[in-house]
Amino acid sequence: MANFARANLPTLKKTASYYLVHIMVAAAVAYAVTGDLFMAFTLSLLEPTVQAVAFFLHEKAWERKSLPNFAQPGVTAESAPG
């Protein structure tokens, strides 16, 4: 787990920052819609938590997509097209 955290530290930091901003926005919107502080708090934790996981996976997919073909697992410079 420590290796995973170290290898993904920039993305994890970005995800945490996004998570906090998302919670604040979600709480404000939920309170504006419901007028209920408890409901706003509950919704503001649930939805951003799911979004944070989706954001992390999205970032990792974009990182993988931006790698040259030969940098992807299982593909060597000798076997890359071109």
Image (cartoon, helix red, strand yellow):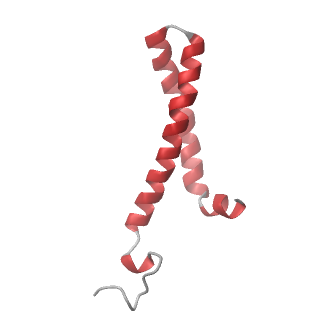
Q: Residue at x 54, y 9 (%)?
A: 36
Place of residue 77 in the rendered image (x, y in percent of width and height, measured from the top left): 41, 88
Find the residue positioned furthest to the top: 35
- Position of residue 69 relative to residue 59, above or below, is below
Q: Residue at x 51, y 50 (%)?
A: 56
Q: Residue at x 53, y 45 (%)?
A: 53
Question: Foreground residue, 24 or 49?
Answer: 49
Q: Quadrant of residue 62?
A: bottom left
Specify the quadrant that holds the N terminus: bottom right
Specify the quadrant that holds the C terminus: bottom left
Question: Foreground residue, 21 or 56?
Answer: 56
- Position of residue 51 relative to residue 27, above or below, is below
Q: What is the tally of numbered marks visible in this picture?
A: 0
- Position of residue 73 relative to residue 32, above or below, is below
Find the residue positioned furthest to the bottom: 78
Find the residue positioned furthest to the right: 2
Place of residue 29 in the rendered image (x, y in percent of width and height, measured from the top left): 45, 19
Place of residue 21 in the rendered image (x, y in percent of width and height, measured from the top left): 53, 33
Q: Residue at x 44, y 77 (%)?
A: 71
Q: Quadrant of residue 32?
A: top left
Place of residue 60 in the rendered image (x, y in percent of width and height, measured from the top left): 48, 58
